[in-house]
Image: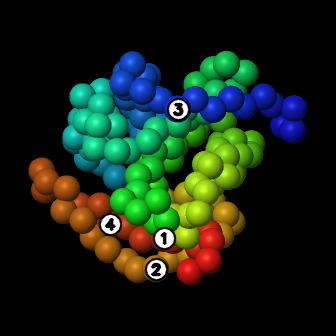
Amino acid sequence: MRDMKLNYKKADRQDAGLIAALAERIWKKHYITIISMEQIEFMLEKMYSAESLIRQMEEGHVFTLVYLDDRPVGYISLSTKDHKNYFLHKFYVEADEQAKGIGSRLLAHILGSLKGAESLELTVNRQNYKAINFYFKNGFVIREVADFDIGGGYFMNDFIMVKKIGKQ
């Protein structure tokens, strides 16, 4: 798959519907073996609706869409308070396009844009072995185990992972 042409686009408010549609397809296919459909629906509405995505953009989350041959296949979102330490909020690639190097190239693209960055932190569901292995492969380590109450009687049972980027 070395010949695949990837393009990256910084998302804006007009892309919120596209990101929400990608999230719905990706989540319903990927997470159904990890969490219940009820929790998937709850989280999609709470964190991935177009309105929620626009609010996140207004709060400083920077979204980047990745296109494979001009077709949107994934997205990533991160934020920072100090331009040294970043938090990766969202990182998803269509299930049918995974294991082709798209995620690694998207991550490398984002890391290359973080001039002066020291670390990138994220949370990942402890049962999401595919993602955990991807992050290990890309230099992340588990910093701690954490459970987050997200409302509606649901919890995110996660690992907090971090990748050291620059000088500490």
The disc placed on residue 161 is 1
| Looking at the image, residue 144 lies above or below residue 67 | below
Amino acid type shown at disc 3 = Lys
Residue at left 72%, top 31%? 6
Q: SS of the residue at dot 4?
A: strand
The disc placed on residue 157 is 4
CA separation, marks 3 and 2? 29 Å
Mark nearest the camera among 4 and 3 is 3
Residue 87 pos. (x, y %): 43, 59
Q: Is residue 114 left or right of residue 48?
A: right
Front residue of 78/138: it is 78
Residue that mark 2 sits on:
143
CA separation, marks 2 and 4? 14 Å
The disc placed on residue 10 is 3
User: If the image is split into quadrants, where does the C terminus sit?
Assistant: bottom right
For the residues bearing labels 2 and 1, Cβ distance under 8 angstroms: yes
Answer few, some or many: residues within 10 Å of disc 1's Cα (few below 14, many 20 plus, some between 14 and 19).
many
User: If the image is split into quadrants, where does the N terminus sit?
Assistant: top right
Mark nearest the camera among 3 and 1 is 3
CA separation, marks 2 and 1? 5 Å
Mark nearest the camera among 3 and 2 is 3
Amino acid type shown at disc 2 = Arg
Q: Reading the chain from its start, which is encountered first: label 2 or label 4?
A: 2
